[in-house]
């Protein structure tokens, strides 16, 4: 079986409950070729057997990219070559462009942050900011929550502040609090925002046929550096094939998955999908010039970000409790508390962390 939301919403919980078949025999056929983050993202904790194992077969992945209207940046009198490299300076750089562009354009905003309580994009965006501010340790690989870690609390407050303040200041489209996963794409294509964080290359690839946009007016790149000048690892969203216990044709399912993850087969599949998703095997990018083609900056940047630069698994890999955190959009609700209810980022972070602690209490890992 496969579903887009399975890695976060189906597999961790089902593995915990002992409802999935161990697919280690399939993964091990190509294990040496996989990216380490992809392998980690396929291992989940089985609370019945009290151990971790492969309950998913990785076959594609994606990271959060930064899509920018380079043409609007230049129209505002700025140069892409002067774009700051560190986190806060990078996002702040877009703010003054809004005032300039509004002299000739109506309804354009600097930042296309998805800060709603639906879909994956709000979680993707918040997690990137949390990690950039030093909060990746909120859940460690042993499945333990560290909500009481001062560094985690500080990172959460900074992330909430960084995402909500521009909205309150008018730099983010008002409708962003209600955006679904496709809405920031649509707003970007309509030139309602100068830039937007977005998972996969769906934004640029969707307009490949539009003359001058792909690898021209639209620039798609990776995450800026942290404020300390060090790389911020991207969370690698890995899509997985899985087999429920009780499946009628386990042999056929394993044969298909074994076929699918052959480097040539899965590489051609992803290439024919125009590079919207990435391979999970570095060998594919090294042997097929499609992925690092210097003439295709969009795909080359995406490939470097997801296969060469630092990546880390999502939090739900370590404990299924975080899948529930994401499903409940606890951090998005915290953003709403700040924007709509006037709560301070500190109090919103405290509230969110207490809710997360309550969820984790149901998923103890010895």
Image: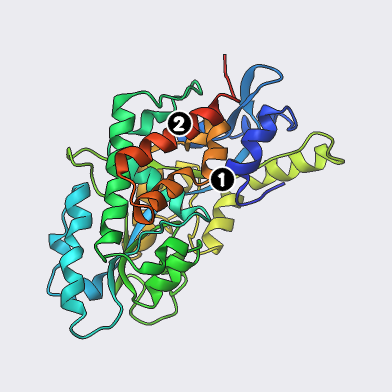
Residue furthest bottom in the image: 104
Measured as percent of width and height from the top left, residue 186 is found at 44, 72
The numbered mark at residue 327 is 1
Query: Which residue is found at the position 40% from the left and 49% from the top?
Result: 337
Counting the numbered discs, the total is 2
Image height of 183 relative to 123, above or below: below
Give the mark nearest the N terminus, 1 or 2: 1
Query: Which residue is found at the position 81% from the left and 37% from the top?
Result: 250
The numbered mark at residue 20 is none
Quarter of the view holding residue 147: top left
The numbered mark at residue 354 is 2
Question: CA separation, marks 1 and 2?
Answer: 16 Å
Measured as percent of width and height from the top left, residue 365 is found at 57, 18
Q: Is residue 309 visible?
A: no
Measured as percent of width and height from the top left, residue 354 is found at 45, 31
The foreground one among 90 and 263 is 90
Give the structural element (helix, strand or loop) at label 1. Answer: helix
The foreground one among 141 and 278 is 141
The foreground one among 241 and 30 is 241
Image height of 357 relative to 122, above or below: above
Label 2 packing within 10 angstroms: few (<14), some (14-19), many (20+): few
Quarter of the view holding residue 307: top left
Query: Which residue is found at the position 18% from the left and 83% from the top?
Result: 103
Give the structural element (helix, strand or loop) at label 2. Answer: helix
Q: Which image quarter holds the C terminus?
A: top right
Q: Is residue 99 left or right of residue 157?
A: left
Q: Is residue 64 visible?
A: yes
Q: Is residue 180 left or right of residue 295?
A: right
Quarter of the view holding residue 111: bottom left
Measured as percent of width and height from the top left, residue 124 is found at 43, 49
């Amino acid at each position: 079986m496969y579903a887009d939301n399975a890695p976060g919403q189906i597999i961790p919980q089902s593995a915990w409950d002992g409802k999935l078949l161990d697919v280690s025999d399939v993964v091990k056929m190509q294990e040496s070729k996989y990216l380490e983050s992809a392998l980690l993202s396929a291992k989940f904790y089985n609370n019945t057997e009290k151990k971790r194992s492969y309950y998913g077969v990785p076959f594609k992945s994606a990271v959060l990219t930064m899509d920018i209207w380079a043409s609007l940046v230049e129209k505002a009198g700025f140069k892409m070559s002067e774009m700051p490299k560190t986190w806060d300076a990078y996002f702040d750089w877009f703010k003054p462009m809004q005032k300039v562009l509004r002299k000739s354009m109506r309804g354009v905003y600097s930042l296309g942050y998805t800060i709603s309580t639906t879909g994956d994009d709000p979680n993707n965006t918040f997690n990137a900011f949390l990690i950039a501010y030093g909060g990746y340790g909120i859940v460690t690989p042993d499945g333990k929550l560290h909500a009481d870690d001062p560094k985690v609390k500080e990172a959460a407050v900074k992330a909430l502040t960084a995402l909500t303040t521009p909205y309150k200041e008018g730099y983010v489209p008002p409708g962003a609090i209600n955006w679904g996963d496709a809405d920031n794409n649509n707003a970007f294509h309509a030139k309602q925002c100068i830039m937007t964080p977005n998972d996969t290359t769906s934004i640029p690839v969707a307009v490949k046929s539009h003359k001058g946009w792909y690898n021209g007016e639209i620039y798609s790149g990776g995450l800026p550096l942290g404020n300390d000048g060090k790389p911020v690892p991207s969370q690698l969203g890995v899509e997985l094939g899985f087999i429920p216990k009780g499946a009628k044709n386990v042999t056929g399912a394993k044969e298909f998955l074994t076929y699918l993850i052959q480097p040539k087969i899965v590489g051609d599949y992803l290439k024919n999908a125009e590079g919207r998703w990435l391979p999970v095997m570095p060998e594919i990018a090294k042997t097929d010039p499609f992925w690092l083609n210097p003439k295709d900056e969009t795909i080359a940047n995406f490939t470097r970000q997801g296969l060469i630069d630092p990546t880390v698994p999502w939090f739900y890999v370590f404990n299924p409790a975080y899948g529930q955190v994401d499903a409940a959009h606890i951090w998005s609700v915290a953003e709403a508390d700040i924007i709509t209810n006037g709560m301070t980022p500190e109090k919103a972070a405290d509230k969110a962390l207490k809710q997360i602690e309550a969820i984790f209490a149901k998923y103890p890992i010895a």
